[in-house]
Image (spheres, coloured by chain):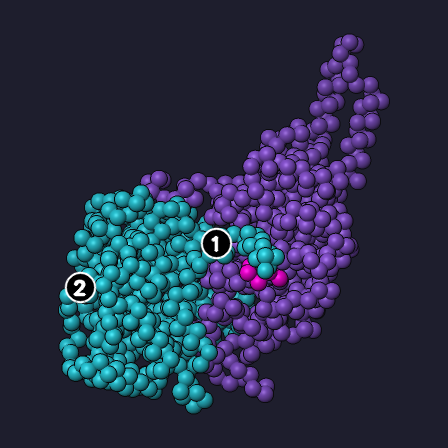
Amino acid sequence: MQQMLSRKASFNFHGEDSPYFLGWKEYEKNSYHEVHNPSGIIQMGLAENQLSIDLLESWLAKNASVTHFKEDRGGSSLPLSSSLFRELALFQDYHGLPAFKKELAELMEEIRGSKVRFDPNKLVLTAGATAANETLMFCLAEPGEAFLIPTPYYPGFDRDVKWRTEVELVSIHCSSLNHFRLTKHALEEAYQRAQKQKLKVKGVLITNPSNPLGTTMSKDELNHLLDFVISKKIHIVSDEIYSGTVFDSPSFISITQALLNHKKVHAGNDISKRIHIVYSLSKDLGLPGFRVGMIYSENEAIISAATKMSSFGLVSSQTQFLLSNILSEKNFRKLYMKENQKRLKKRHEMMVSGLENAGISCLKSNAGLFCWVDMRHLLRSNTFEAEMELWEKIIFEVKLNISPGSSCHCTEPGWFRICFANMSTETLNVALQRIKTFAVGICEDRINYQQALCSSKKSSFNKWLLHPLSLWRNHQDHESKYR
Amino acid sequence: MVLINSSLKEQVQLLSKIATNDGHSENSPYFEAWKAYDSDPYHSITNPQGVIQMGLAENQLSFDVIKDWIVHNQSASICTSEGVDKFTDIAIYQDYHGLPKFRNATARFMEKVRGDKVTFDPDRIVMSGGATGAHEMMAFCLADPGDAFLVPTPYYPGFDRDLKWRTGVQLVPVICESYNNFRITRTALETAYQQAGSSKTKVKGLLITNPSNPLGTILDRATLEDLVSFINEKSIHLVCDEIYAGTVFKMPEFISIAEIIEEDIKCNRDLVHIVYSLSKDMGFPGFRIGIVYSYNDNVVNCARKMSSFGLVSTQTQHLIAAMLSDEIFVEKFIMENRERLGSRHEMFTQGLAQVGIGNLNGNGGLFLWMDLRKLLKQPTFEAEMELWKSVINNVKLSISPGSSFHCSEPGWFRVCLANMDDETTKVALQRIKKFALQTLGALEVKPKKLSCQRSLKLSLSFQTRDGIMMSPHMSPHSPSSTIA
């Protein structure tokens, strides 16, 4: 029967056999609940923002008369407006509800400090960022062509960008040595590697702020990227889905802003037609269930093609209507974004200090719903096998679902993405306690092991490797990692 | 000039072929007619001379029944004070299995629409971005680029986009003809299958729409059984689009492929898949509720993963789950909907018969398959296009020419009748009658009362079958007509 299906159906191109998704499945079998299942697995592999949804819910509760298919005329809500319900039920225009797109464009401007303008007519609505990324690939590349992508990257891209489109992804290797920043050298190296594999490169896909790093791209990185794509005459797809989660400096620089400030941009250069932004309300507003994604581009041909393709995954008209109401109040929008960022910052601080207590450090980050955590010192060896071993221990013994760096295509073992915005403070405390117990336990085991090793070698002078002073020094090294 | 051309060429090269070709099929007259309406829409008061939209298969007849339910079930919406406490749970839920209550309620509704003669397993229900998304998903799951699906003509023009555009899959028409009321014959199926084979095209499946769009007819038991044995013999898939299942308004009763499958133990169930949606039966195209139901576990698994590209908004899942779980409402709605569709259909067919215009005898769908062959100047597709343009521009009715449905015979038109109120229907009928009389008069043909059941033998000598078969994008102009 397998050969009765397409190649796409028959193999695991969907990428769901990756540990990223396997961890979720384990969590589903044994989910933590503070009352019903306190020793269950805590979900820390899901980048969801549950910190500020109460703000949306309470706005809705106060304004229900406006949003539920009723027309509020002068303060008194009338019975259900059948014409409004009917209009929404019938509305399947792939251009989307104009009022909704207007609000989205304004929201995107505000997130970027009003430094750039967005034209609602250049926005295409899609069923989540998942569909937006796939649609852009269908528009920009032929099967077998490639996009370059900095590592580590969101595992879902293997499905969204590659599966049905048959587009290839070629990694741009980023290293912990310079905090995983994008370099000119890495871009060029990736391009050459693609050429050697006879892959035609059509563009670069970036996520800014980064998932899984939680960092925003610097001006230099963006300039390197722009130089690169201008010289190669290729596209940039900038997934800015976390743009509203920037809670600390440096402030977010969108690709559009970077372009405005770029020295090489001049009238004859059509680079602006090769830059496309993906956005969604799943992370900033914490509404993944509503499937609201979008593509923004100055390229009319892209807008035209993507709009037609959006027929395969339009946003439900009642959801467009609901959200256009919620987002219509500018003051509320600003209040929400500010409060959201404040709560994210606080949660992030809690996470970072909790990990520090466990002797674990993170990449310094200022955005996103997760930390990029350095557990290299907890690996048995500097290998991906050791990383998988550690990950399995963390799932099955520590009962935390976190995402191993290898599932994000990180080139160095030992890094993990741990989410912090999808649970209560109490649950996060429980999780941090478990991590601490585990990490301290490993280090104590190591110290005991080395002590045992030391004393067995002491008996033979020729095999004596560790001076007591060195042992003390080793112990000090372990101690310093905990700070 | 050279500079402009090369820059345009560069632009085109920057994009993929899919983005720049006509695979979206929007250049078809089917969509052109919509544009005519958009630029001059009829309104009984503000624009009584405008174009009446009869090219859009929407069901607007039973909204009041739904509205009544919503008023009495405020908690079904997360936007009311009664329902807002569910907002957070609903908004954060993104599991591609869908809300269990949504799947349960949809499965139950599908059973009810089929007269409780079949059972559907909620775990086999997969969401999609409308039936549009469902069809594309099926093509991706079942076929590789270059493979083909057989499709009986005439068929819904959207299939050219949904099944072919981004998937690279081909459609091979199975020619159905008016002489036997456009039935799908074994001969036609075999011919199509052989022709695909002779051009080295691998056939992966057969796609049927039952009830048919644009015919408005249902498949009888014998045809369904024959289709099942055909696909089993050839080991190909059968995709049944049953999007109009709830619009069958009079006898004979609708027979779903599910019924045949449940009765036939010899059929390989792994080959059978149903596409459904609430866009037509309930009139909710804006809510994007598409369903794939497959009897094949591997297809369910694959489709479920692919559904990430077009999940149904949880806000909508929540509302629909509540609505369709109300069995009293569902029964009332199904009955009321059928009655109203039946009345509207009768109003129209009788009106047309008064001026001697017939239609294919149908009992489902939101449209009529109208026979305007005797209004053609010649039995050609050019004449059909001329007539169509005249109907749009002079009669101010946006109807869909048969050629846009890949019909092999000129002169047939699909006319939608459920997307307007009674008054507008009367206005539309008046306009058609007037036009028909004028045109018939001009052609010097006396109108005569025809029975609704027509059976005509039609000669295809003016058009070669090869010409039809080899042209996947059925242009309004016959590709190789030899005799006018």
On residue A199, the disc is none
Q: Colour of chain A?
A: purple
Position of B400 with respect to B179 (left or right) is: right
On residue B18, the disc is 1
Foreground disc of the pair 1, 2: 2
Q: Is residue B251 above or below residue B290?
A: below
On residue B459, the disc is 2
The residue marked by circle 2 belongs to what chain? B
Of residue B313 and residue B444, the one placed in the foreground of this image is B444
- Which quadrant: the C terminus of chain B? bottom left
Kind of residue at badge 2:
Ser
Kind of residue at badge 1:
Ile
The cyan chain is B
Position of A315 with respect to A450 (left or right) is: left
Badge 2 marks a residue whose secondary structure is: loop
**Residue drawn at x 41%, y 70% as measured from the top left:** B32
- Which quadrant: the N terminus of chain B? bottom right
